Amino acid sequence: MVRYFPSNDRSGLPAHFEFWPGNPTAVGEVTTRVFSARLPVVCRQLHDKQPFGMFKGENAMNYAFSTFLLEAIIIILCIKFVCFLLRPLRQPRIVCEIIGGMMIGPSMLGGSRNFNYYFFPPIANYLFANLGLIGFFYFLFLTAAKTDVAAIAKAPRKHKYIAAIGVLVPMTCVTVMGIALRSKMHKSLKKVSSIGGIVFALGFTSFPVIYTILRDMNLLNSEVGKFAMSVALLGDMVGIYIILVFEAMTQADGGGTTAVVWFVISSVIFGAFMVLVVKRALDWVVAQTPEGKLVDQNYIVMILMGVLVSCFLTDMFGLAIAVGPIWLGLLAPHGPPLSSTLAVRSESFIHEFLMPFTFGWVGLNTNVYLINNETWPDQLSPLFYLTIVSFITKFVSTVAAALFFKVPTRDSLTLGLMMNMRGQIDLLLYLHWIDKRIVGLPGFTIMVLHTIIATGVITPLIGFLYDPTRPYRSSKHRTIQHTQPSTEMGLVLAVSDHEAVSGLITFLDFAYPTTTSPFSIFAVQLVELNGRAQPMFIDHGRRKEEEEDEEEDEEEDKEAEQRPKRSKSKRINQVQSAFRLYQKKRHEYVKLHAYTAHAPKRLMYQDICELALTKKAAFILLPYNRERLDDDAPTELRGSGMLSVNADVLDHTPCSVCIYHDKGRLRNAAIRSSVDQQHSNHSSLMRQETYRFVVLFLGGADNREALHLADRMTANPDITLTVIRFLSHNHEGEDEREKKLDDGVVTWFWVKNESNERVSYKEVVVKNGAETLAAIQAMNVNDYDLWITGRREGINPKIIEGLTTWSEDHQLGVIGDTVAGSVFASEGSVLVVQQQVRNQKGGDGFLNGKFDYKSLVSPWTCHNT
């Protein structure tokens, strides 16, 4: 498109879109390479000087920079406004952004001539096009940098088959449909290269699209979410090569065989340069970065500038301009420190500032009024029928393939819907179609509407079909109470930093595993997902075996492999080292299996619950999490976001849960004992320290679970245990069933430990919460080292009457929060126990014949993203 914009009473150079010297345009006309539509030239006086202010008669709208600032404000506000309106409908961010961009386009506000003249003059199209493209490029680069290409080789075989079937079947059907409709297509649409480009776009589901939408829906770490990303990534890797084939076909249409040959040569040279030079430079940057630190700012600036360089080179060589950022991002080492630093430094700016211009550019090119009887027969109807065929065949083929490989019906349906979602990559392809004269603005508009409708309808359906927390509920007893004393007890230990490890390990020692009653510990380190798109769950036992096998195979090529090994050896994981050391010292009665889970904080609970479910653990042991100021950065909160992990585990756990609030007393005492043992030559001279534990038994399932755990500790000769049972005055507020269960457990405990001098039992009768609190405070004079209590389930409300209003920390429950608080002034640690809540439903919705209308309405309730 050619436009002349006069400046300073002189004719300036044409600001152009797809301007080519070989196609001169008559003065006073604007033509496009698509359909040669004649448009009037819009002339506008541009001012070089800055405005002196409205009080001196100046109009800020006459100045290009002021107009640009107002345009930026309008598009960002429009997108935020639409996001706010559609939030109750659980629409993903991409749908809100497209509609927000359409608000400034000719479909809505842009239909007003006055709005266009004052707020979006013709020069705005040029600004939006360039800023929009830059936003696309950096979005693609950042998403590719988070992508783990190595995951393709590790993908299960069924994922590869489902990906192949979900791509080949719709591509074949769309191709057949395109050939059948070819005689009715517009001349620019019926070309072989045009049909091939449409088949490619409709056949593939882009990984960045799946990733961004699943992230908005909090499904990244779900089973079907991982499945969908794996399948999409496999398809994308094939799609990158198909893009090259498509570009070669378009080169052949314009320049013949010679153009194709030079295109291939340029692609090979560019690819070799990226792999041999750029990748090594990026690896060198990672090697220069100290462990736990961010990459130097100068390197980040150079890499971000390299995105623009790659765009320039691919455009110069005739490749799709988006190929450069994608290749550069895929070559960048994913995860910390490089990709995580890129995300920290640039992600907010790209998503919140650059991408609105991208969607504004899309909106300026979207005009629903171009969908009419004139454009429908040859331009729009073929695209409409092709998209319908693609949607149906992709859904059916993906669901059928998933069912064939024994994927549950509900998950298969969800996967089929996910594979039909559209997003940023698709919009870029549609814009590329305009650039390659495949479609015009009417065709572009109908494809944008297809993106909005498909993604907007699919997202609530997925929320209705798939509940990521559903699999974690178990109908079987998985508790400490129902685990036989003489059998192995499985437990999941979850920590996020090395500070909590020593306290939890000290507690496990006091839990006293023995050779007859050993512990099988599944220790998982929780790492926030930074610089990665795909959540990772690493089994270090299996990984160690694979690394040993690789070392044997790589002995022949030591020089090539020594460099990465040295860089890895510099980065020592303190948490995993603590796990290995504990296993080495307690190997006789403890089996420890180490894992690392990379996931967003709000989804970490899924890894913990899934591990507990698959390993049939009796309980999950978590450290007490709270936000506090970081010692290294006093202005930043440490542990921010980890509070929700404990809360979500408590809500969705498949077994019992123990939360340990370590105040350091037990840990320090254990260290002193260890030092005494090392310096003592005879066991008789070793100083034995006695630790005082107390159980606050208020009744209910959680307190019964806590008493069973304390019973296991009575075998430890260094522990004295006191059990305090609180009873309501005149049996007020008591539940008859709970009272019988409590009496049975307490009687069993006392009969078993009656002859144990280190165990004592007391009963306290109280009238309300105030008397309960007074009784607990009176016990503080005994200076207990560990307070054990149940969280909340089944407690007589009369016993804690009045205390609930003062409780601020729900993860510890009313009594646990009271004892752990600073007002209580106890130096002893606190252990809060919650017993498993078993699943009694026995079904999961309408697919099992138990449909509930409330599940249909729930996806449309307001939620927080």
Image (spheres, rainbow, N blue to C red):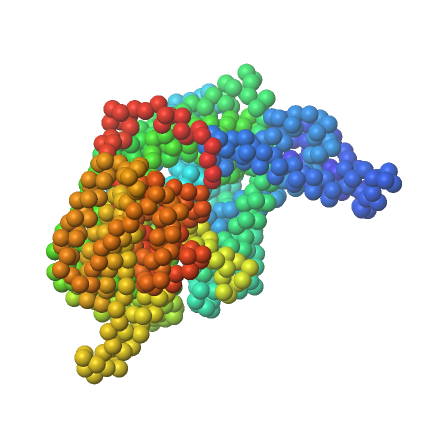
Q: In this view, does 736 lie to the left or right of 245?
A: left
Q: Which one is in front, 6 or 99? A: 99
Residue in the image at 75% along x and 38% along y: 5
Asked whether the viewer can see residue 819, the reply is yes
Asked whether the viewer can see residue 454, the reply is no
Q: Which one is in front, 192 or 507? A: 507
Residue sitting farthest toward the front = 730
Residue in the image at 65% along x and 31% along y: 31
Q: Which one is in front, 750 or 712? A: 750
Residue in the image at 44% along x and 43% along y: 805
Residue in the image at 57% along x and 44% along y: 352
Image quadrant in which the N terminus is located? top right
Above or below, 60 against 510 in this view is above
Q: Quadrant of residue 793?
A: top left
Residue sitting farthest toward the bottom = 681
Image location of residue 130, percent across then percent down:
61, 43
Image location of residue 570, percent across then percent down:
38, 70
Q: Which one is in front, 484 or 800? A: 800
Residue sitting farthest toward the top = 373
Residue sitting farthest toward the right = 56
Q: In this view, does 155 lie to the left or right of 45?
A: left
Q: Quadrant of residue 168?
A: top left
Count of marks placed on residues: 0
Image location of residue 495, percent across then percent down:
35, 57
Image location of residue 384, percent across then percent down:
45, 23
